[in-house]
Image: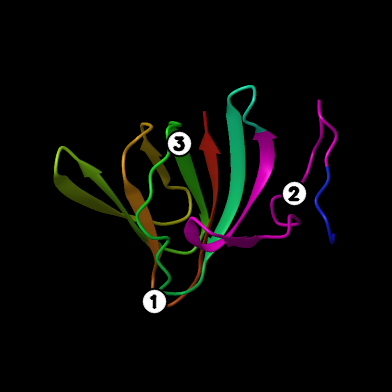
Amino acid sequence: MDEFTKPPDAYVVSAYDVPLRENPMLRGRWARVVDGSGRGLIVAAGRLAAGEDSGWHDHPEDEAFIVLAGRGIVRWRLAGDEHEHPVEPGAVFYKRGGISHSMQASADGELVGIGCKV
């Protein structure tokens, strides 16, 4: 699949088939699978290479990130304190909009997941 196109109202797509690209705001490779941002929903697939860190970032939307493969660490900052937690397949990292956060893949393999923002 060279270019990801989708009909506007209903579709099915495998997140594994969507071409992931570099994002100027994050390290890793990412692509929006659902872009309903005008209606309040964004779903993106993402991959960090072994040892790669997404970099600290924030956005106004609440987000849930579901780890599909690999292991890593998620970090977030609240009230001046930095927190971190290990993640592996099946883990869901949730944070409210505006909270600075980052993810890092373990040194021994990539981290793959799906992020859902509203």
Closer to the N terminus: mark 1 or mark 2? 2
Q: Is 19 part of what is drawn in magenta?
A: yes
The three-letter code of the residue at mark 1 reads Ala
Graded by Cα atoms within 10 Å as few (under 14), some (14 to 19) or many (20 or more), the crowding at tag 2 reads few
Closer to the N terminus: mark 3 or mark 1? 3
- Name the residue located 38 percent from the left edge and 32 percent from the top edge: 97
Graded by Cα atoms within 10 Å as few (under 14), some (14 to 19) or many (20 or more), the crowding at tag 3 reads many
Q: Callout 3: helix, strand or loop? A: strand
Q: Is residue 40 above or below residue 75?
A: above
- Name the residue located 73 percent from the left edge and 60 percent from the top edge: 19
Q: Measured from the top left, where is residue 103 in percent x and y?
A: 38, 57
Q: Label 3 to label 1, Cα distance in Å?
A: 25 Å
Circles 2 and 3: CB atoms closer than 8 Å: no
Q: Label 2 to label 3, Cα distance in Å?
A: 20 Å
From the viewer's perspective, tell me whether residue 62 is left or right of residue 116. Answer: left
Q: Which residue is mark 3?
A: 63
Q: Measured from the top left, where is residue 58 in percent x and y?
A: 38, 43
Kindly identify which numbered label has been placed on residue 86. none
The three-letter code of the residue at mark 2 reads Ser
Viewer-closest of 23 and 66: 23
Q: Is residue 93 above or below residue 19?
A: above
Q: Callout 1: helix, strand or loop? A: loop
The segment highlighted magenta reads 6-35
Kindly identify which numbered label has been placed on residue 14. 2
Q: Which residue is mark 1?
A: 107
Q: Label 1 to label 2, Cα distance in Å?
A: 27 Å
Q: Callout 2: helix, strand or loop? A: loop
Q: Measured from the top left, where is residue 25 in percent x and y?
A: 49, 55
